[in-house]
Image (tube, rainbow, N blue to C red):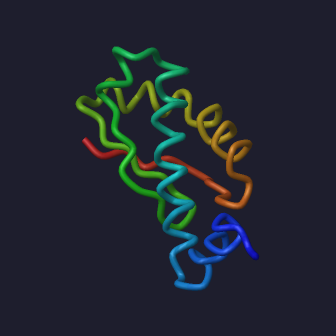
């Protein structure tokens, strides 16, 4: 008899949603990384939106916040790629 975990472990790949699930996990981890780097208060003014073509898009409330993100871009991308080597995030896109 197979365990439920074993049965459902391959379902995302079979139905073609494994990449979408990974992108959702990347967004979730990005929010945590932003909180770790900038602190909870400042991270509230940043919202990771989506991952597309190795670029993560983050909405910000002001140009100053976008500039802060730009200054820490290499660190953020590095931490994301440590957590998700298959995602191969290359850059951050900022939306105001």
75 vs 9, nearest the viewer? 9
Quadrant, the N terminus:
bottom right
13 vs 56, nearest the viewer? 13
How far across and how far down the image is residue 76, in percent? 59, 35
Quadrant, the C terminus:
top left
1 vs 36, nearest the viewer? 1
Residue at 48 percent of width and 65 percent of height: 52
Residue at 62 percent of width and 42 percent of height: 77
User: In the rendered view, does 62 fall on the left or right side of 78?
Assistant: left
Furthest residue in direction front, as rendered: 1
Residue at 47 percent of width and 18 percent of height: 38
Residue at 30 percent of width and 46 percent of height: 95
Task: Say if 72 sits above or below 57 in the image.
Answer: above
How far across and how far down the image is residue 80, in percent? 63, 43
Tell me the quarter of the picture where residue 44 sits. Answer: top left
How far across and how far down the image is residue 8, in percent? 61, 72
Q: How many marks?
A: 0
Task: Say if 5 sits above or below 95 in the image.
Answer: below
User: In the rendered view, does 40 fall on the left or right side of 72?
Assistant: left
How far across and how far down the image is residue 42, in percent? 36, 18
Task: Say if 10 sits above or below 50 in the image.
Answer: below
Tell me the quarter of the picture where residue 63 sits. Answer: top left
């Amino acid at each position: 008899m197979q365990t439920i975990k074993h049965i459902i472990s391959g379902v995302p790949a079979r139905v073609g949603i494994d990449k979408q699930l990974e992108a959702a996990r990347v967004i979730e981890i990005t929010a945590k990384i932003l909180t770790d780097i900038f602190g909870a208060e400042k991270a509230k003014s940043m919202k990771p939106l989506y991952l597309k073509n190795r670029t993560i898009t983050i909405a910000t409330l002001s140009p100053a916040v976008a500039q802060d993100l730009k200054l820490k871009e290499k660190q953020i991308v590095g931490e994301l790629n440590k957590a998700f080597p298959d995602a191969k995030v290359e850059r951050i896109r900022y939306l105001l």
